[in-house]
Amino acid sequence: MADAEMAGHATEQPAVAEPVYQGARPEQESQVSLFVSPIAANATERDLQMEIHVAFNNGMWWAMPHELSNGILEQWHNGAQEVSFIWDWHGTRPGSYQTDGANTSLNRYIIDFGTMQQRNIDNNRTRRVKVVYVLRC
């Protein structure tokens, strides 16, 4: 966990059809099926931002803040199959990580890009993840 990054709060996003990498890196593009909306079809690379979305309740997805997902995606692009990070709830709820039996507001995670799963290191709960392109306005 030495390379883990601290995170802020995520935003909740509805599940929509978006370009999604399912375990393959961009250089393996021939192995990936992409849906591209007519709006995004004319977008340039600088108009698009990659994000990590994490499955949530009722078909919803959380979009990780760019300050966290950018570092995770960079490690993935550099060949990392698994990337660890720390999520800080900033006192808004208890985290799963305990230090010497004391509660914290931290959750520790590993994303496995081979299985597209996020696993909580402390309680082994998993959630699906997806990597999407979003159009910057």
Image (cartoon, rainbow, N blue to C red):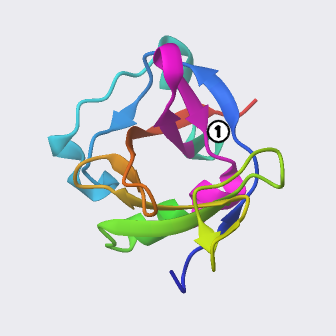
Q: Does 68 lie within the magenta span?
A: yes
Q: Residue at x 62, y 24 (%)?
A: 13
Q: Residue at x 33, y 52 (%)?
A: 26
Q: Circle 1 is placed at which residue position? A: 47
Q: Does 80 lie within the magenta span?
A: no
Q: Residue at x 76, y 29 (%)?
A: 137
**For the view shown, which residue lies furthest in the left direction?**
31
In the image, the segment drawn in magenta is: 50-71
Q: Residue at x 48, y 23 (%)?
A: 41
Left of 73 or right of it: where is 23?
Answer: left
Question: Where is 102 relative to 54, above or below?
Answer: below
Left of 16 or right of it: where is 22?
Answer: left
Q: Residues within 10 Å of mark 1 (few under 14, many from 20)?
A: few
Q: Nearer the viewer, residue 84 or 133?
A: 84
Q: Amino acid at mark 1?
A: Asp
Question: Where is 17 relative to 80, above or below?
Answer: above
Left of 108 or right of it: where is 21?
Answer: left
Q: Position of residue 59 (x, y in %)?
A: 47, 16
Label 1 residue SS: helix
